[in-house]
Structures are given as structure tokens and as C-alpha cells.
Image (tube, rainbow, N blue to C red):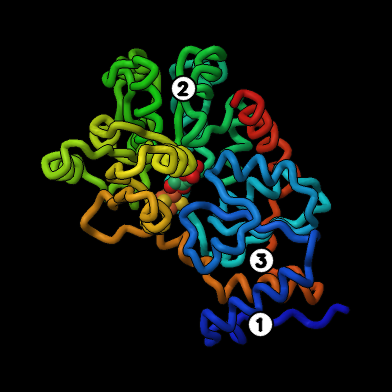
């Protein structure tokens, strides 16, 4: 039976233990009508309730294949948007806290990307010369932009395959918003660093000369992840000095030097898999978000593996951390009483174009 929506204020002062009980009871009531998808950066207090966990690519596939009426996303805004776009119109995607955004995704917006296209169009036939590639960490309207201009979406786990696809369409790539993932992907494909130029959206013609753009194979949007910027090559050097036998693994959102000096680079799922499958007794330095590293360190202890965080500073993704037991309990209790709160709904015309690029991505990867 439906009652009036419950206000979040009622949950604000609830302690975590009480929220855990309320979450479990709502999950029980909702049964198969609910699926909870959780990204690896989520706090244990909510992550433990996820039916499925993964990196962005894996979670996109779960969202596309789920039959549940409600898809509750423990992650950030763009992830819930992808779940909405890839699920059926009668399914509902929900983000327990609307303020859980991604600061990197916010570094590119449609007005700036359109301006970039207009400026490039003064010198080139944009749609014949550039394949726009957006990292999945971007708003739905940027995915729609890629749909409109023959482009595609990539994630940290399929970026090379996607870039190969993009180069098969046109001679150059416009890659946004993460310059580091774009550069690392190009480098792995053998593209010289001086053929990957940074496009500064706040400068005329991206701060580049026509000659530089002529020479470039990839234009890298000037964006980055503030969490992964914290990892430095000197952290790796110190670790190698102390533990020459140790292994280093990093996420491709880290700077180029950090990626180059790591033994392995890959998505959050790749990091978990690689460390989990390593030999007992191995020591690891891991360059990605703190919640993932702490959880991995705990899980690896029984096998005698030591997992260390790459930075001496605490670098948590503060927006991911907004999804706490209080917000999850509030969301689920409302759903159990027939009220949808915090629905993420992408406008149908935008969703259609964005879906084109996401489907393309899923087919290519
Ligand atoms: P993954 O797709 O590797 O999980 O990365 C998502 C993300 O936001 C990393 O900062
Ligand atoms: Fe965005 Fe960085 Fe947080 Fe990932 S870690 S969600 S890229 S701000």
C-alpha cells in the first residue's frame, strides 16, 4: 500500500547499525523487483548490499541485462544515467544521493564540446576528420553528441579496442574528458607523445596551432580525476627501493608517468582480478581509490599478500562516498512503500542518441 514519501531528514540522525537493519528489511520486502549495482569505490557499509559489483563496463552490462523494476545504483551520477539509458523504459534507475557526481565528468560539458567542434570545423570537415570518443565518465548529453557525430563511448577496460574502432572510422580522435586515459591508450597503441595534444577548452582553438592539430592523431581534452592525480612517480620509486620484489598496479586515470612506471595498468575490475590471482605472499602497491584498496588489502591478508595504498595521503572519492547507509535506507524504504525517490531519467531524445554510442561500445568490446 502506498503512503506519502518519507523525508530524508528522518534518516539523517539514524546510526549506521539501525540503517543496516532498515536496508535489509526493505530489500526483503522488494525481492526480485529490486537489483542493487555497486561500484568498487563504494564504502563497505553500502557495498555489502550490492547484488552485483564491478567496474563501469561490467555494471553497464548488468544494467542492460537486468529484469528488475528498480535498479538502485551505488555509484555516481553518470553510472545511474547509463543504467537508465540501457534499461527498458518501464524500469527505474535510482541514485540514493543526487549529489554523488563525478568531478572529472564535470570538466567537459556540451557547450564547451560544441564550441570545440565549431572551432575545429573552421579548419576541417569535423565529421570526416574526427571520431569523438567520450569516456563513460561523462554526462548523457556528451554521449548523445558522440551519437550524433559518429562517435563512441569507452571505459577504462575497453579504451584500446574502442580507439582502434575510432581510427577505423576517421584519421583523428577527439577524446574527452580524461586526458590521462586518452594519452595512456594512445601510447599503448604506439602513438608518439607529440602526436597527442592537449585541447584546453578555455583557450581559442584549444591553445593549439593549426600545425599542431594537423600533426595530432589524438586531441586530449584538458580534464583529469582529482583522486588519481594524487598518486606520484616518487611514491612508486620509494616502494621499489624498499621492496624491489613488489609489484605496482595503477588505474589509467593516473598520470602518464605513474602508468609508465607501473607493472600493470587497468580498470578497477582488472586491479581486483590481478591482485586476487597473484601468488600467495606477493606485495602490491595500488594506485586507485582508497575504499577499493582497503577492501582488497583485507581480503588478501589470509593469503599472506600485502596490499599498500600508493599515496601517503588519504585520497577518497568524496562524491562516491556520498552514498551512505542513511541514503540507501531512505531510498529503499520509500521504494518498499511504493514511492520512487531520486529517479535518474534521461530525456528520451538524448537517451536515444546516447544509447546508440553505448550499444556500439558494448558490441565493440
Ligand atoms: P572503472 O570503470 O575502472 O571502475 O573506473 C571508474 C572510475 O570512475 C574510476 O575513477
Ligand atoms: Fe570521478 Fe575520479 Fe571519483 Fe572516478 S574517482 S568517480 S573519475 S572523481
Question: In the rendered image of this protein, does residue 323 appear above or below residue 193?
Answer: below
Give the SS element for disc 2: strand
Query: Where does residue 5 sit, x and y in percent of width and height?
Result: 74, 79
Q: Quadrant of residue 92?
A: bottom right
Which of label 2 and label 1 is nearer to you? 1
Q: Horizontal placement of 28 versus 302: left or right?
A: right
- The quadrant of the image that shows the N terminus is bottom right
Mark 2 lies on residue? 173
* Disc 3 packing (10 Å; few <14; some 14–19; many ≥20): some
The numbered mark, 1 or 3, whose residue comes first in the sequence reads 1
* Disc 1 packing (10 Å; few <14; some 14–19; many ≥20): few
Query: Where does residue 278 sit, x and y in percent of width and height?
Result: 38, 38
Alpha carbons under labels 2 and 1: distance apart: 46 Å
The numbered mark at residue 342 is: 3
Q: Horizontal placement of 242 versus 34: left or right?
A: left
- Residue at 47 percent of width and 24 percent of height: 160
Residue 278 seen in the figure:
yes
Q: Are marks 1 and 3 in contact (CB under 8 Å)?
A: no
Confirm or reject: label 1 Cβ below 8 Å from ligand 2: no
Q: Horizontal placement of 317 versus 39: left or right?
A: left
* Disc 2 packing (10 Å; few <14; some 14–19; many ≥20): many
Query: Where does residue 300 sit, x and y in percent of width and height?
Result: 39, 51
Q: Quadrant of residue 9?
A: bottom right
Residue 177 seen in the figure:
no
Amino acid at each position: 500500500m502506498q503512503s506519502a514519501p518519507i523525508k530524508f531528514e528522518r534518516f539523517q540522525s539514524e546510526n549506521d547499525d539501525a540503517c543496516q537493519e532498515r536496508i535489509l528489511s526493505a530489500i526483503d520486502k522488494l525481492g526480485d523487483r529490486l537489483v542493487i549495482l555497486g561500484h568498487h569505490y563504494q564504502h563497505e557499509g553500502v557495498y555489502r548490499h550490492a547484488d552485483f559489483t564491478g567496474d563501469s563496463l561490467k555494471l553497464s552490462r548488468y544494467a542492460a541485462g537486468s529484469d528488475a523494476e528498480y535498479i538502485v545504483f551505488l555509484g555516481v551520477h553518470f553510472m545511474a544515467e547509463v543504467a537508465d539509458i540501457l534499461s527498458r523504459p518501464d524500469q527505474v534507475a535510482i541514485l540514493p544521493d543526487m549529489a554523488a557526481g563525478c568531478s572529472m565528468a564535470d570538466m567537459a560539458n556540451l557547450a564547451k564540446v560544441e564550441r570545440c567542434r565549431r572551432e575545429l570545423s573552421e579548419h576541417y570537415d569535423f565529421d570526416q576528420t574526427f571520431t569523438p570518443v567520450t569516456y563513460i565518465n561523462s554526462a548523457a548529453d556528451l554521449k548523445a553528441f558522440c551519437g550524433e557525430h559518429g562517435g563512441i563511448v569507452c571505459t577504462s577496460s575497453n579504451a584500446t579496442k574502442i580507439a582502434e574502432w575510432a581510427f577505423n572510422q576517421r584519421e583523428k580522435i577527439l577524446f574527452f574528458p580524461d586526458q590521462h586515459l586518452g594519452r595512456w591508450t594512445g601510447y599503448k597503441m604506439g602513438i608518439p607523445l607529440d602526436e597527442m595534444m592537449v585541447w584546453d577548452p578555455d583557450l581559442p582553438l584549444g591553445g593549439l596551432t593549426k600545425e599542431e592539430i594537423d600533426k595530432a592523431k589524438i586531441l586530449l581534452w584538458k580534464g583529469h580525476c582529482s583522486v588519481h592525480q594524487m598518486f606520484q612517480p616518487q611514491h612508486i620509486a620509494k616502494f621499489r627501493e624498499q621492496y624491489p620484489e613488489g609489484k605496482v598496479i595503477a588505474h589509467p586515470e593516473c598520470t602518464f608517468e605513474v602508468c609508465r612506471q607501473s607493472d600493470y595498468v587497468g580498470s578497477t575490475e582488472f586491479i581486483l582480478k590481478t591482485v586476487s590471482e597473484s601468488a600467495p605472499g606477493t606485495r602490491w602497491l595500488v594506485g586507485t581509490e582508497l575504499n577499493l584498496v582497503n577492501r582488497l588489502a583485507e581480503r588478501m591478508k589470509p593469503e599472506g599478500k600485502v596490499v599498500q595504498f600508493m599515496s601517503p595521503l588519504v585520497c577518497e572519492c568524496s562524491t562516491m562516498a556520498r552514498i551512505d547507509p542513511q541514503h540507501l535506507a531512505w531510498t529503499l524504504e520509500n521504494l518498499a512503500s511504493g514511492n520512487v525517490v531520486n529517479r535518474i531519467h534521461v530525456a528520451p531524445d538524448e537517451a536515444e542518441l546516447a544509447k546508440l554510442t553505448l550499444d556500439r561500445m558494448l558490441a565493440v568490446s
